[in-house]
């Protein structure tokens, strides 16, 4: 499972809010909600987040094995 906990930590350190993502950077409300719910997003979205936050992918997302499938 891909989780976006690192995204929220990175955003907090940089004082970036979801409002900033939506208004200043044009990210849709639906995309922000998907991120908040750890739902799948496109690689385009991940790339955009890395550009906005000037960070690498590991500062945005992390892989956590799904225990139910093992």
Image: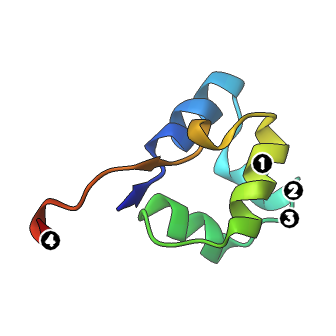
Q: Nearer the viewer, mark 4 or mark 3?
A: 4
Q: Position of residue 26 (x, y in %)?
A: 85, 65
Mark identifier at residue 69: 4
Q: At 77% across and 38% down in the image, what residue appears? A: 53
Horizontal arrangement in the rendering, residue 11 relative to residue 69 (left or right): right
Q: Are marks 3 and 2 in contact (CB under 8 Å)?
A: yes
Q: Position of residue 14 (x, y in %)?
A: 71, 26
Q: Nearer the N terminus, badge 3 or badge 1?
A: 1
Residue marked by disc 3 = 26
Q: At 52% across and 70% down in the image, what residue appears? A: 34
Alpha-carbon span between mark 4 and mark 2: 37 Å
Alpha-carbon span between mark 4 and mark 3: 36 Å
- Residue 31, compared with residue 13, is above or below; it is below
Q: Position of residue 8 (x, y in %)?
A: 53, 40
Q: Label 2 crowding class (10 Å Cα cut-off): few <14, some 14-19, many 20+?
A: few
Q: Label 1 crowding class (10 Å Cα cut-off): few <14, some 14-19, many 20+?
A: few
Q: Are marks 4 and 2 in contact (CB under 8 Å)?
A: no
Q: Are marks 1 and 2 in contact (CB under 8 Å)?
A: yes
């Amino acid at each position: 499972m891909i989780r976006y906990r690192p995204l929220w930590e990175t955003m907090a350190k940089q004082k970036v809010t979801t409002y900033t993502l939506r208004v200043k950077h044009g990210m849709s409300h639906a995309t922000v909600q998907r991120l908040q719910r750890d739902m799948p997003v496109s690689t385009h979205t991940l790339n955009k987040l890395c550009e906005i936050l000037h960070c690498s992918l590991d500062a945005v997302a992390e892989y956590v094995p799904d225990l139910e499938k093992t």
